[in-house]
Image (cartoon, rainbow, N blue to C red):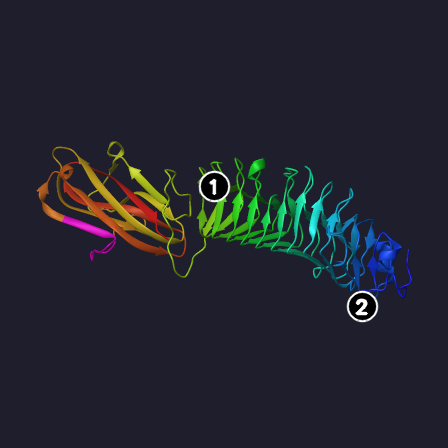
Amino acid sequence: MALTHALSTNNYGTAHLIVATSAANGTHTTLATALADAVTGDTVFLRDSVTENVTLVAGINISAWSGGSLNTPSISGTITCSSAGTSTISGIELITNSAPFLTVSGSAASIVNLRDCYLNASNNTGISHTSSNAASVINVTNCSGNIGTTGITMHVSTSAGNIIYVSSNLSNTGASVTPSSVSTGAVSVNNSSFGFNLSTSSVGILTTCNSYIDNSSNNSTVITTAGTGGANLFNSVYLSGTASCISIGAGTTVNISEITANSTNTNPITGAGTIVLGSVTMPSTGHVINTTTQTLRFFQAGEYIGRTVSTAPSAGMIGEQIRAVIASGSATALTTNTPLSITSISLTPGIWDLSGIVGFVSNAATSTTQTQMSLSQTNNTIISSTYGDQSIANTFPALLADQVTITIPSYRVSLSATTIYYLVVQATFTLNTLSAYGRISATRVS
């Protein structure tokens, strides 16, 4: 019902569009009629709560009327926007009525700002973003809200555009484990606290920064990636109870820096995808990252703090050790004055501390006058006679080789490509046989 704006009972000066259930208190009794009378640049003030579905034309705003009732006025129903331009909804409780409280659809560059609102996903997922326009954005700023039942979540985004949360606190009293998802564009969570899970699929991208994501009471993984997109997780805390905090799907990449993954699961971070890893704190009983591909993120300055648990570092992590051993019972036969690789290791790019040790097994009649070993990048090749970190030789009067052990203490190598190092042995001996055994090992330091 549209009312006459000039009536003394409902003339509020510059606020010429006011929705009130009583005709005496406003200019319109329904939100739909107020929006129909509005033009670009207008703000429709909501004095009293309404239950209706409306279409929001970009350029028109909806705001709580400061002179209204003590309770925050609410809209129970769906607000749909598909036009180009920007609209702001502020100070209002948005309530699902068996459908999303906000749907941004179509192909236009629709921008909807939700400011200081209460987002009440009581019986349906709250936000549906399906616009095909990459410039379409939903900004959620200084909002609070809640998910009220299972099987629903706060948002589902299949849009090419973005949803951006800033300084918002959204809880989950309904104990839902259904993630808020993004499949095409991006979702960004900044300086916010969520009580529900988040996920990506297809080419969707998720970013969290300075945020707190906690669904530990439901023992549910809080970040899940799938498809070919991924996530950027920075300066945030994730709590998941007995479930893994973060699950990285095959084909996705997750960049991590300065996060806390709090889980009692053996693997707080898991999956078949790729993790680009900065600093991670794991304060609960779970401490293992077992993603298929792990890459270190380097910082210009600073150090990595050592692990305090008994599990070995994963491949690619600082402290990773690669070693190859030939036991004395499996010693390899040598030919005098002929270098031989008795074992080898393959090292991936990085900085490694490399070392080796060799022992000998001979018959009683074997006489040995020289032993040499090298940690060489060339198979069956002793590094030149100018010995250094990677090679050593002993020359002595004839004696039994069983009395000889030679060692190359730890030294550092920097590799830009995967490199094989061979444990190469050479000896000068007479009269009988001589065999060699030993170990080559490397520890990743960066």
Q: Position of residue 240 (x, y in %)?
A: 54, 40
Q: CA distance from mark 1 to mark 2?
A: 62 Å
Above or below residue 235? Residue 149 is above
- For the point 82% across and 50% down, the residue is 53
Q: Position of residue 403 (x, y in %)?
A: 13, 38
Q: Main SS of the magenta segment?
A: loop
Above or below residue 57? Residue 435 is above
Q: Is residue 371 left or right of residue 191?
A: left
Q: Is residue 200 visible?
A: no
Residue 1 marker = none
Give the residue type that dot 2 points to.
Thr
Q: Position of residue 78 (x, y in %)?
A: 79, 49
Q: Which residue is mark 1?
A: 290
How crowded pointer 1 is (Cα within 10 Å; few <14, some 14-19, many 20+) is rated as: some
Q: Is residue 18 visible?
A: yes
- For the point 23% across and 40% down, the residue is 334
Q: Please state, as top left, top right, bottom left or bottom right, where the N terminus lies in the image.
A: bottom right
Snapshot quadrant of residue 65: bottom right
Task: Report helix, strand or loop for mark 1.
Answer: loop
Q: Is residue 245 magenta?
A: no
Task: Report helix, strand or loop for mark 2.
Answer: loop
Q: Nearer the viewer, residue 14 or 288?
A: 14
Q: Nearer the viewer, mark 1 or mark 2?
A: 2
Residue 14 marker = 2
Q: Is residue 127 left or right of residue 397?
A: right
Residue bounds of the magenta highlight: 383-394
Give the residue type that dot 1 points to.
Asn
Q: Nearer the viewer, residue 284 or 254?
A: 284
Of the two numbered discs 1 and 2 on the same chain, state the one appearing first in sequence.
2
How crowded pointer 2 is (Cα within 10 Å; few <14, some 14-19, many 20+) is rated as: few
